[in-house]
Amino acid sequence: MSISIPSPLSARLLTAIISCVTATLPLSGAAPAPPLPVSALVEAALIQHPELQFYAAEIAAAKAGHRSAGKLAPPELTSTVGQNRVRNAAGNLAGEGVAWSVGLQQQFEWPGRIGLRKAIANGNVTLAELGLARFKSALMGRVRTLAYALGAAQEQAEASRDVAERLRDLREILVQRDPAGLTPLLETRIIEATELIAQRTASDAELAVAHALIELNQLRGLAPDAPLTVATAPPIFRGAPTLDSLLAAARTNNFDLRLRAAELEQQGFRVELARNERYPSFTVGPTFTEENAGDRQRIVGLAISVPLPLWNNQAASVDLAKARQTQADASLRAAQRDLDRQIATAARTYENKVQTLSHWRGDAIAHFHDAAETADRNYRLGAVPVATYVELQRQYVDAVSALLAIRREALEAAAHLETLSGLPQPLIGWEPIPRQP
């Protein structure tokens, strides 16, 4: 059997990564970090995640746009001044003086236009709030999944290290005996190979612990190497509602669907606004004019100005708004179909994984652990062949990996279902377990 030896650079990189994991553990004599339940991790992420400021600023900007959408244009003050000369019929200068005028004008929109702009701005606020709600829902699901992944990887690492240490002790005993013959030598090589595989599995699990720990700390706005201990029991999987109930809940609560519906409503307002803008705005205001050229003349009046849209009838804008409305409607219907597919797939996955977990005994892991220890003791006494011994060690590690993988897949399917359908009652239950230092 050929075993590849890692390069010095790879070995140093692996050592550095493992050091990141061990650095998070409390030092001997120091008070360990108190274990945190999953609910505390979720609450901390919802308060401290850095990206929440982006969504808060987006909502503030949308509300500011809503306030400005209902305001009229500011009034305009106009004035003119000049020299006025008056000549008689013969062309002689009859008088000379100053002529000036002043006017105050206010632009008024066509009736209904400001209301449409306010409706569009209000839709922007709704979209921003839905974006924040969707982000929070995804964040909660991700934190729960990472919390379980962290605990599962720790359990995986413990089982693999347990097997690796057991095999290492046995290998050292066999080497000290200096067995003669082919069969003892081959048995030693089998044990050495199984030990290497167990060490590799434990190293991968420890890397998974490091990755989950780093991401959890970042989601909570903390340093990547901040110490963390998660206090959780195996998740409790509740029965999922029927597919019809899930689809009905999704049509009401799904964030993506609500976003598409809000965008379609906005496009409807944009079409109406484009049609309204075919009619011009008008400006009204008082004017005062005075001329001094021999005689003094004063004129007080009311000025009205209206643009003539001879070359701009807004037909192109209306067609563009209608096209965008058609696209929004098609996007909504496509999102509905895709949502139905995702919910059906996630529901089937969740049901399958939960049903598979129901066949596992509650003490399955402890059962395999005891069997592995029993095989170790009896192999040392010569009562168990090496094939049975090695197979039991492998099965112990594989059983732990399989159980944890099925739980993780069921948890991911449940989190996906909760995000898609917006279920008020979560599918996963957690029971904190205070771990003794």
Image (cartoon, helix red, strand yellow):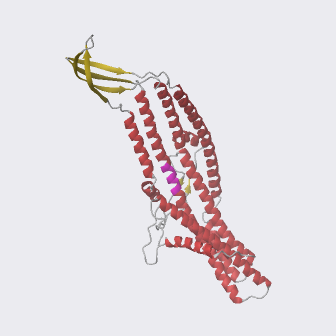
Q: Is residue 91 visible?
A: yes
Instruction: Tell which of 257 and 323 is nearer to you.
Output: 323
Q: How many marks?
A: 0
Horizontal side, residue 284 vs residue 170: left or right: left
Residue 307's image quarter?
A: top left
Horizontal side, residue 392 vs residue 142: left or right: right
**Residue 111 place in picture, x, y as percent:** 40, 24
Overall secondary structure of the magenta stretch? Answer: helix
In this view, which residue lies farthest toward the right?
A: 182
Instruction: Tell which of 246 and 219 is nearer to you.
Output: 219
Asked whether residue 137 is drawn in magenta, I would say yes
Horizontal side, residue 10 vs residue 105: left or right: right
Magenta-tinted stretch: 135-143
- In the rendered view, would you say 77 is above or below 167? above
Instruction: Tell which of 256 and 32 is nearer to you.
Output: 256
In this view, which residue lies farthest toward the top?
A: 89
Instruction: Tell which of 376 and 246 is nearer to you.
Output: 246
Asked whether residue 57 is drawn in magenta, I would say no
**Residue 365 place in picture, x, y as percent:** 62, 67
Q: Is residue 429 visible?
A: no
Residue at x 33% of width, y 32% of height: 74
Image quarter (top left, top right, bottom left or bottom right) of the N terminus: bottom right
- In the rendered view, would you say 362 is above or below 47? below
- In the rendered view, would you say 358 is above or below 282? below
**Residue 258 place in picture, x, y as percent:** 52, 39
**Residue 61 place in picture, x, y as percent:** 41, 43
